[in-house]
Image: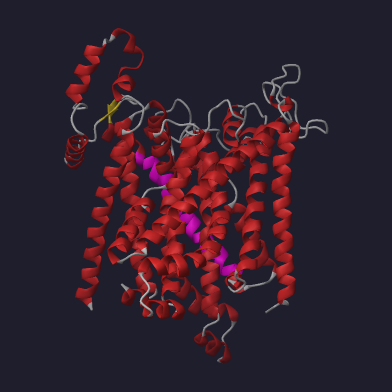
Amino acid sequence: MKSQTLFLVARRLLRLCALIVAVAFAVFVLLKASPFDPVNAYLGPAIAHVGPEQKMQIASIWGLDRPLYEQFLRWAGNLLTGNLGYSITYNTAVSEVIGSRIATSLILTGLAWLCSGILGFGLGLIAAAWEGHAIDRIIRLYCYILAATPTFWLGMLMLALFSVRLGWTPICCAGPIGVPADDVSFLQRIHHLILPLTALTLFGVAQIALHSRAKLIEVLQSDFIILARAQGATRADIILRHGVRNAALPALTVLFATIGEIFGGAILAEQVFAWPGLGRATVEAGIRGDVALLLAIAMLTTLIVSTGNMIADMLYRVVDPRLKERR
Amino acid sequence: MKKTSVNGRIRALLSALFALSVIILISVSAWYAGETGIRADFASRNIPPSLSQWFGTDQMGRDMFARTMHGLTLSLRVGVLAAGLSVIIALTVVLLSGFGKLADSIGGFVTDAMLSMPHLVLLILISFALGGGTGAVIIAVAVSHWPRFARILRAELIQVRAAPWVEASRGFGKSRSFILINHILPHLLPQMLVGFLLMFPHAILHEAGLTFLGFGLEPSRPAIGIMLSEAMKSIMAGRWWLALFPGMSLLMMVLCFDLLASGIRRLISPREAQT
């Protein structure tokens, strides 16, 4: 049994590696096909002083005149040795751009992910416990509306209300303007975090809540719950002892599967709240044609999201052993 | 079994019709409003919402109501094309992967690969690769949204393939392609309509987000995303109506589509709609 699990994990990891290589190649080809000329993007306004011969020279130094697969292998080799290239948007190494921004991004995204998981599961539990009652209807309606709301729009409304009208929260960024990032106090950090975190959390809640509600209702209809009720267990007892345990794992699975969604939401939220994280860097890189930075961010998010998907996939098997037999 | 089934069906039909009429109303009103509202009128700049101008005006004096209606029709067009294309891609991939074990695992691998990147990052990459514009957004949304639906279709295909009449057909010596086209495809088609309607809200929300970030539709077009990114600049000045109404209208339209989708799903497969 144990070696079987180990075998499964190994196979999943191998598949993950294959996936990442395939995605890397696809992304590379995609960006190569783009009409943005990297030489022109690099030169910027200096393009007026550079002749076509010099442009060719730059292209040949960069290896742009080589066949596509050779360029890909070179890039992949550099990637594996830790050389991510040079970002023309921020004028430093890509690894430095990512290194300085990943922490701010992960604080926002990670916290929002956790909060949406906890809040969503809680709402799902409440809705399932009172299935069909007014509170269930309200929670469900709320989830449907939330799922149809553009997150960035919600963020804008929150900015307009809380920051501009009421002045409770700061209007932008991860710290007061003009203060270096290291000098921002903990309280100031929290103060700046509240609004983006709320917006991003609300974005993730709906799906988790609806899913845990459905799962818990399914659990509550099973035979052992009827037995427990016959033995005189109270509703709270049943939900806390049997319901939560059985619904927690499916909810966790969905939570892992939604990592990609929350990353996408984070890009929009960072743009609205001017949060200096990877999301803003992605947008900047895309607008200015910073291919090296775009490639690196795409690979980083792919790594995180596909790992999340893999964990979700393995959890599915733990939750429902029947799946194991099918493949 | 809480209510009689006739009531449920009629209610589903009514809500679907209501949603459909709202969607038609939006497209007609934009056509009716014409170009008048979109033209700049510097005599009436930054007017808050009032009875004569429901959604207020922006910094160039354009009537936001007319712009919003135009934006919604634009979203509608992009959403219909993108979701339709996406459903077709999903169906093609699933049908092709129905041909054998190897094809199935290749199809599964491609689906997993597409899902292993955040939607928005993929959208940005594709629209970057295609150089932006309306066509690029439609293709980007279509290409990034099919995998989720393909998974649903694949589950359906596996289920139908195990059905007795398919077994019987196989027993008569019919080929794989005959079974796929004559037995399985007709079962997947009703799913396509539901899939299209369910995908539509995602498509227009992602279109709006992508446009908001500056990768989507051209700034000259009155798209909801463009309006919202312009409104972002005037939020500090307290002009909240520029953000509130276009977003609210988009939300309403998405909810209408959800209503339509759930109504039609209830009509097509009543058992599934119970969950």
Residue A65 at x, y percent in the picture: 20, 26
**Residue A105 belongs to magenta span:** yes
- At a point 34% along the width and 29% down the height, the residue shown is A290
Main SS of residues in magenta: helix
Q: Nearer the viewer, residue B142 or A288?
A: B142
Q: Nearer the viewer, residue A156 or A288?
A: A288
Left or right, B104 with reference to B240:
left
Q: Quadrant of residue B222?
A: top right
Relative height, residue A256 to residue A157 (above, below): below
* Residue with the most extreme bottom position: A231
Note whether residue A187 is visible. Answer: no
Note whether residue A31 is visible. Answer: yes
Left or right, B230 with reference to A48:
right
* Residue with the most extreme right position: B51
- At a point 64% along the width and 39% down the height, the residue shown is B73
- At a point 39% along the width and 73% down the height, the residue shown is A319
The type of colouring in the image is secondary structure
Left or right, B193 with reference to B102:
right
Q: Which residues are magenta?
A: A102-127
Left or right, B235 with reference to A81:
right
* Residue with the most extreme top position: A49
Relative height, residue A309 to residue A94 (above, below): below
Q: Quadrant of residue A267?
A: top left
Q: Quadrant of the C terminus of chain A?
A: bottom left
Q: Quadrant of residue B32?
A: top right
Residue A152 at x, y percent in the picture: 55, 41
Q: Quadrant of the N terminus of chain A?
A: bottom left
Residue B224 at x, y percent in the picture: 61, 36
- At a point 69% along the width and 34% down the height, the residue shown is B241
Instruction: Count up the numbered dots.
Output: 0
**Residue B65 belongs to magenta span:** no
Residue A51 at x, y percent in the picture: 26, 10
